Amino acid sequence: MRIGITPTNDLLPLVHRPQAATVTITNPYRLAEFRKEKGISVDVRAQDETKRDFLLEMQVRPDGAPSSRMHDTWSRIYTEQIKRGESYLLHKPVVSVWILRHP
């Protein structure tokens, strides 16, 4: 599903990334591939026309380890971009924006 890109482009200068021309909402879930592996989900996941991934997560309750969750979510999305035997040069940036509300 294509969406308006204004909200996404408003955030990109904050993370020193170039603007996107189009953004497509993608599936925000990554199911676990193995029985004991954790799946992940984000509130909004999108890709621009160059296949650059955008993650937007909003937390209203404190999480015991937000930094670890941020790194875990970002790294899983980043590593799923390429398949076994493909060049690491195929990786695209993953922009991850977290909005946290603390009491």
Image (cartoon, helix red, strand yellow):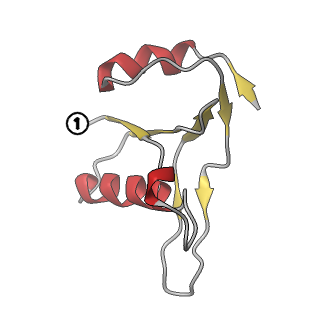
Q: Residue at x 31, y 23 (%)?
A: 16
Assign a secondary structure to mark 1.
Answer: loop
Q: Position of residue 48 (x, y in %)?
A: 60, 30
Q: Is residue 41 above or below residue 58?
A: below
Q: Position of residue 38 (x, y in %)?
A: 48, 73
Question: Could you tell whether 103 is left or right of 96 in the image?
Answer: left
Which quarter of the figure is the N terminus placed in? top right
In this rendered view, identify the residue nearer to me: 9 or 41: 9
Q: Is residue 61 above or below residue 78?
A: above
**Badge 1 is on which residue?**
103
In this rendered view, identify the residue nearer to me: 75 or 30: 75
Question: Could you tell whether 30 is left or right of 102 in the image?
Answer: right
Q: Is residue 74 above or below residue 45?
A: below
In this rendered view, identify the residue nearer to me: 41 or 86: 86
Q: Quadrant of residue 61?
A: top left
- Which residue type carries mark 1? Pro
Q: Position of residue 14 (x, y in %)?
A: 31, 20
